[in-house]
Image (tube, grey):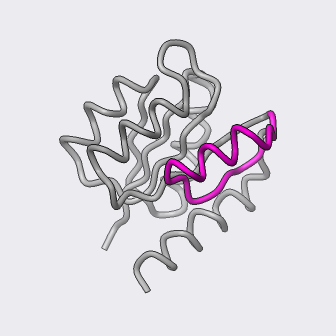
Amino acid sequence: MVRTVMVVDDRVGIRKLLHEVLQGAGYKVITAAGGNEAIKMIGQETVDLVLLDMKMSGMDGLETLTQLKKVCPQVIIMIMTAYEELEVLKEAARRGAAGYISKPFDIEELKDVVASKLRAESA
């Protein structure tokens, strides 16, 4: 069964990079340029894991996380952040994030984290 990963980031370069990397790793990948788009898409598509940028224009990562969890409580959400702000990470965890990945990320590490989160969820 092919797992679906959604990448939510307002930077087109990051969306393209992660789309290529994750598709190459065998996932179905959908991308959203922001929170509102992600929320619309998750209502129409089965998503197993979301890679969510914290710093986006418009709806920020925490608000997007809250809304995504309302629409789809079982989805695994991984935060992507360049700023490991402990308060923000704690708040994200409190709202249901499964963990975080630091930017700039190591591609192999990112693939490992995605694979292990999906394995843990299906176990």
Q: Nearer the viewer, residue 59 or 18?
A: 59
Q: Which residue appears at 47% of the width and 19% of the height?
A: 59
Residue 94, position in %: x, y? Answer: 56, 51
- In the current view of this chain or complex, which residue is farthest to the left? 44
Q: Quadrant of residue 42?
A: top left
- Residue 49 higher or lower than 122, as above or below: above
Residue 95, position in %: x, y? Answer: 51, 48
Q: Nearer the viewer, residue 88 or 1?
A: 88
Q: Nearer the viewer, residue 59 or 41?
A: 59
Q: Which residues are magenta?
A: 83-102
Q: Which residue appears at 60% of the width and 34% of the height?
A: 53
Split into 4 quadrants, where in the image is the C terminus? bottom left
Residue 118, position in %: x, y? Answer: 48, 70
Q: Which residue appears at 73% of the width and 53% of the height?
A: 107
- Residue 35 higher or lower than 43, as above or below: above
User: Is residue 65 rendered magenta in the image?
Assistant: no
Residue 114 as seen in the image, left or right of residue 87: left
Residue 106 as seen in the image, left or right of residue 19: right
Q: Quadrant of residue 66?
A: top left
- In the current view of this chain or complex, which residue is farthest to the bottom? 123
Residue 40 as seen in the image, left or right of residue 26: left
Split into 4 quadrants, where in the image is the N terminus? bottom left
Q: Which residue appears at 42% of the width and 35% of the height?
A: 31
